[in-house]
Image (tube, rainbow, N blue to C red):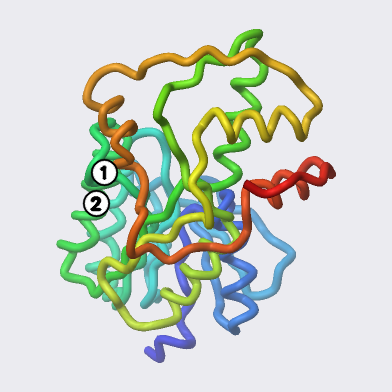
Amino acid sequence: MNTTNAPVLVTGGTGTLGRHVVPLLREAGREVRVLSRHARELPAQGVEHVACDLRTGEGLDAAVAGTRTVLHLAGGPKGDDEATRSLVRAAREAGVRHLVYISVIGADRVPLAWLRSKLEAERAVSGSGIAWTTLRAAQFHDLALLMAEKMAKLPVIPVPGGMRLQPVDAREVAARLVELTLGGPAGLVPDLTGPAVYDLADLLRTYLTARGKHRPMLPVRMPGKAGRAYRSGANLTLEGADKGTRTWEEFLAERTGTLLGTA
């Protein structure tokens, strides 16, 4: 089968990242098959939805059949390792030639259960016997916004001391993933971060300013090994990363309609 004529299978194609990835693949002239738990019709030409549950494997063989490239975006707070192993088994049996995976910076350094699951998923991909590419990205602006929205509902915001983030724009991550998907297998590629590092307190203050809110902040100490990892910057890539250009302030301005200064 001509690889360029085969559909690209995208797991998580309806999520934050997938909603940017799918149109970019279509703009590049590729047919796209979106894996979701419930099949549904989309008005977009060249986009097919197939029903599948990665956890149970139900519908997975049919979803992978006829594809030569799989872009694995689906993820959650737990179970990513098992879901990825299930996908890898089906992809190997279907003759997939390129498996692309999105992971998280710090998966190999921060001792949290969901990051360990991401690391195990990375290992399932790299040990699959299929040619592969893995990109580790920083937290999306969207996730930072969700966190800020939830914390701002509290009368006093507890802020873990020493915690820093490098939020990156999901559209820039999507563009990089599409570039990698359409290219050849590259193994573990340089991390992708946002253009700036923020103390969590500064990130929250910017959000509160954009929303015209005022909340007192209470510094707290994050305990244990995870706390030490975050304070040491284990969730950051300060050297050797590719950097996006869209800042947290620009993202917030678009979402809130408030013009903000840059850090």
With respect to residue 151, does 1 lie above or below? below
Q: SS at mark 2?
A: helix
Q: How many residues crowd around disc 1 within 10 Å: few (fewer than 14), some, or many (20 or more)?
A: some
Q: Are marks 1 and 2 in contact (CB under 8 Å)?
A: yes
Is 114 in front, or is 210? 210
Q: Which residue is mark 1?
A: 82
Is 90 in front, or is 69? 69
Q: Residue at x 67, y 49 (%)?
A: 262
Residue 235 lies left or right of residue 182; in this view the side is left
- Quarter of the image where one finds residue 71: bottom left
* Amino acid type, mark 2: Arg
Q: Residue furthest bottom?
A: 2
Q: Residue at x 30, y 74 (%)?
A: 96
Residue 109: x %, y % from top left: 23, 42
Q: What is the total number of numbered labels drawn onto the structure image?
A: 2
Q: Residue furthest top?
A: 155
Q: Residue at x 62, y 36 (%)?
A: 145
Residue 95: x %, y % from top left: 27, 75
Q: Residue at x 25, y 71 (%)?
A: 187
* Amino acid type, mark 1: Glu
The quadrant of the image that shows the N terminus is bottom left
Q: Which residue is mark 2?
A: 85
Q: Give the distance between the C-alpha atoms of the residues marked 1 and 2, in whole angstroms.
A: 5 Å
With respect to residue 173, does 114 lie above or below? above
Residue 23 lies left or right of residue 13; in this view the side is right
Q: How many residues crowd around disc 2 within 10 Å: few (fewer than 14), some, or many (20 or more)?
A: many
Residue 27: x %, y % from top left: 64, 79
Q: SS at mark 1?
A: helix
Is 160 in front, or is 87? 160
With respect to residue 29, does 231 lie above or below? above
- Quarter of the image where one finds residue 142: top right
Name the mark on residue 132: none
